[in-house]
Amino acid sequence: MSEQVVIRLSSRICKARWETCPAMLQPSGQHGYKAGKVRNSGDCLRKRAIVFPYSIHRKRFYLDKMRIWTIILAICLLGMAKPLGDAPEGHIPKLPDQKLLDLSGYWRFSIGDRTEWALPEYDDRNWEQIRVPGYWEDAGFNGYDGYAWYRKQFNGKILPKGQDLFLALGMIDDADEVFVNGHLVGFSGGMPPHVQTAYNKFRLYRIPREFIRYDQVNTIAVRVYDFHLQGGIVKGPLGIYAHSPGKSLDMDLSGIWEFRLGDNLEWCEDNQGSWGWKSVMVPNYWAEIGLNDYDGFGWYRLAFELPEDMDAESYFLLMGKIDDYDQVYLNGSLIGSTGFHANGEPIAPSDWAYTQMRTYQVPAGLLRTNAPNVIHVRVYDFTIDGGIYEGPIGLIRSNQLSSFWRNYYR
């Protein structure tokens, strides 16, 4: 059998766009090929690794190590630069089906960086106005790399109460932090000193209900950092969205979670402090938070309180898709597991777990109505990608579960 080499191709390192690509090929037997492990994102396959044989049947083809690495180096060099002119063609996720407010058009804009620009009471009347989406270079800020802020106001009276709302901001080049009425609701990429581009990632952030001023003017503030070439909120659609009845969770829990590397079963206890934990967006691949080649254990946690209109009766916790294995704890109790033995050890590597939606029943009486609840998720990734990478994530009443899934896949 011919010797093999595994080569990782990360679109987040090389900025090579692999959103539509053929299945990965692996040698099967002596002459044939078979499809390898791939990531399915909508209708696109995301190429994350390729397995090449050093030698294929000598009558057909031959690749030595030097030729392989030459090919890979050329691919990476071609993909390193952001494309000039047109906006990046990143994958647009499945948006909620109700668009409540279109946010494209003119926004207030200023280069620079000041923390008070996130606050709704800040007076931005002297700022420039530029059209969004679009590169800020096209609005006269040619050659500028660095920090800039966008601000826009909207009337909360047009938004329905009691529904989860989502803010879509399209593609932002390179990194962003987004505030609604002074509250951080989402971020992508990395700001200095840990710069990481997310220029071809679509931004869709849940707005917690408690951040909305339903009877007043609301302010969206977007902090952007661009480290080279074009910058800005560059491609839509932009707007505030909501799910129609039957497609929404009773409580959506996507958004800002906490995360830490390593493994310690004591971390599932409520009394753990903040040391060692950092904020991350969920859902997201580990590569999106700077862990491009990490394989192993990581833990997530989220504290939340039930709204007044929710009781503590029969619910399911949906955790979306997780790469590869997981154990989910609610208020210190294990409520679901995929890919682990009863003793907490991972099963043998498998190529099925990362494709499965996690749906775990919450035992009666476990949810708290008068105190914070805490979810801990222990994740083990044995190869390629990793993390809680796709929703839906949240709580749904038991009697609504089947209808939710039927509507979700329509």
Image: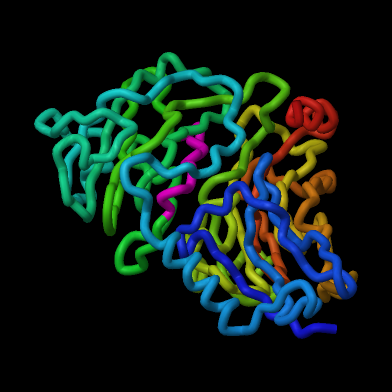
Near-viewer residue (242 or 50): 50
- Residue 362, image x and y in percent? 80, 46
Membership of 205 in magenta stretch: yes
| Residue positioned most to the left | 126
Q: Which residues are magenta?
A: 198-210
120 over 159 or under it: above or below: below
| Residue positioned most to the top | 158
Q: Is residue 118 left or right of residue 340?
A: left
Q: Is residue 203 left or right of residue 360?
A: left
Q: Is any part of residue 326 visible from this angle?
A: no
- Please give the name of the residue rendered at 80% of the width and 50% of the height, measured from the top-left corner: 356
Membership of 17 in magenta stretch: no
- Please give the name of the residue rendered at 42% of the width and 41% of the height, measured from the top-left corner: 171
Q: Is any part of residue 77 visible from this angle?
A: yes
Residue 61: image quadrant is bottom right
- Residue 33, image x and y in percent? 82, 64
- Residue 17, image x and y in percent? 51, 53
- Please give the name of the residue rendered at 26% of the width and 38% of the height, measured from the top-left corner: 150
- Residue 132, image x and y in percent? 31, 30
Q: Is residue 228 left or right of residue 346?
A: left
Q: Quadrant of the N terminus?
A: bottom right
Residue 328: image quadrant is bottom right
- Please give the name of the residue rendered at 44% of the width and 37% of the height, measured from the top-left corner: 170
